[in-house]
Every structure is written in structure tokens, then in C-alpha cells.
Amino acid sequence: MDLSQIPQLKYTGSNNFFLLSGPCAIEGEDMAMRIAEKIVSITDKLQVPYVFKGSFKKANRSRVDSFTGIGDEKALKILRKVSERFEVPTVTDIHEISDATKAAEYVDVLQIPAFLVRQTDLVVAAARTGKTINLKKGQFMSPESMKHAVTKVTDSHNGQVMVTDRGTMFGYQDMVVDFRGIPTMKQYAPVVLDVTHSLQRPNQTSGVTGGRPELIGTLARAGIASGVDGIFMETHFDPANAKSDGANMLHLDHLEKLLTHLVALRKTVNGLQ
């Protein structure tokens, strides 16, 4: 994958990790702009290549009354506004074949959710848009099996593909990241570590996913030390009241300090290679 082919992605020659970050879901224009403005100011300062992340809809919900979105077109238009205002690329996840062409009109990177990454028709539809594709590793899949998901994209004449590890299901209510899988998956495509989703505590009796946000820094540093190419991290200025995945998001106020530490660690790791 050539990072420079992602439109508006800056600092690709900085030898830094790249960052996919933003709220779990687009809750409205004001919140999206507020979060994007803060992250862009930090990543510009640290010269970290940055892609704004926001889901235009949430299809995988534990309960039928969970927040799913503000409307597809409304949310996608907000993602386009973020891109235009701050001159950064955007990424959103898709869930149905019809989502691929629809979302591709508004964003630069299409993300395949972990639970859907084995759905061949969905992956191929996304790849055929020509957009960069981010494949989330299924919680139920081995690192080696992601080779076949990557091949579905490249066989569709799209070489712009990355793999994101978001942990492996351990029992019913926990996720574990096996860092041995990072070098394995790097043989197939650039690898991103999804720090915040890897700290989820799914299948809670309340029907609302829990999390361990106090471990975000620990997991992110371990990812950089293990050689990941990118970091995926959801953030919000009020996680406690976020409409989706607030239990495992990083508070926006803590982002600059963490990214500063990760940039310093990345320099050390680069010096050892």
C-alpha cells in the first residue's frame, strides 16, 4: 500500500506511524468538527499522517434500542465536510454491498468491520470502488487467515489495502491482542492496531459493551514497540455521554500526551531496525 495515494494524507514521508482516529459514530456536525479540529492540530504539530474516522451508521448493536446513526446521507455529508474543512482523508465502515458505492462518494477509505471481513461479496464490492480498504481482523480469525481477505482485495485489482487487528475473543466477555500476529500480517499488508476496540468488554448482561480505557496507553505503546504501521483509536470530548462505544474511548484531552509518547517511542523503534 502506498500511503501517498490516499488523498490529502500529509506527512507520509515522516517515517511516523499513521493514525486513524475520531468518534465511534457521527452524532452530529458540531461534535465531528470539534473532534476533528483538535486531532488535526495535534497531528500537524507531531507530523503524524492522519485519517479522520467516524461511522456513518452502526449496524452491529447488542440491543435493538441502541443508537445506530443520524441518517446515512446526513452523516456521510458531515464526513465530507470534515475532509474539506480540515484537508484530511476520512474513513468509515460499511456493512452492506450497497454501502460500498454510496460511501465511496464521500470518503477516502472504506473499512470492513471485523464480523464481516469473511463476506466475500462485501469485500470485493469495496475493493472495486478503487478506494483504500481497511480490513478489520475478525475476533474469531487467526493472523494467517487474513492473507485470504487481503487477496480478495488485490485480486479485485486494488493494491490499496491494510489490515487492522482489534483483538481476539477470549471467553465471552474479553478481548486479547496477540502481538505475535503483527509480523505475520505485515507480510500481507500494512498493519494497524485498533487500540480502543481491543479493550472492549463485549456481551455484558446490560446489553451495553464495556471497556478498559485505562489500558489504552499500555496497548498503544505495545503496538508501536511491536512494529505496527498505524494506530486506530477512537476518541471523544465526553466519552461518558457518547452514543456508541463510550466505555472504551480515549478522552480527547488525553490524546496529545499519548501521541507525543508514541512518536518518541516510534523514533526509538526506528533506530533499532
Image: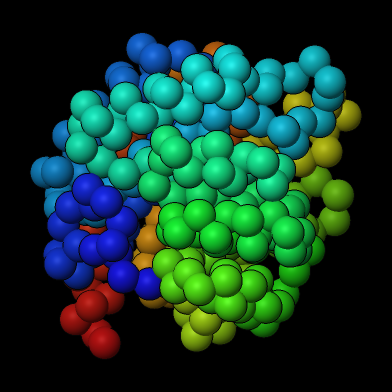
Q: Relative to 81, is 134 above or below?
A: below
In this view, the residue in front, 120 or 42, is: 120
Left or right? Give the position of 122 relative to 166.
right
Q: Would residue 14 be visible to someone looking at this image?
A: yes
Q: Position of residue 56 (x, y in %)?
A: 55, 29
Locate the N terminus and report the quarter of the image it occupies.
bottom left
Q: Position of residue 194 (x, y in %)?
A: 52, 53
Residue shown at 69% from the left, 55% from the top: 122
Q: Quadrant of residue 3?
A: bottom left
Residue shown at 27% from the left, 76% from the top: 269
Left or right? Give the position of 253 relative to 74.
left
Q: Would residue 196 be visible to someone looking at this image?
A: no
Residue shown at 24% from the left, 85% from the top: 272
Coloring applied to the structure: rainbow
In this view, the residue in front, 250 or 107, is: 107
Left or right? Give the position of 171 relative to 228.
right
Q: Quadrant of residue 114?
A: bottom right
Locate the C terminus and report the quarter of the image it occupies.
bottom left
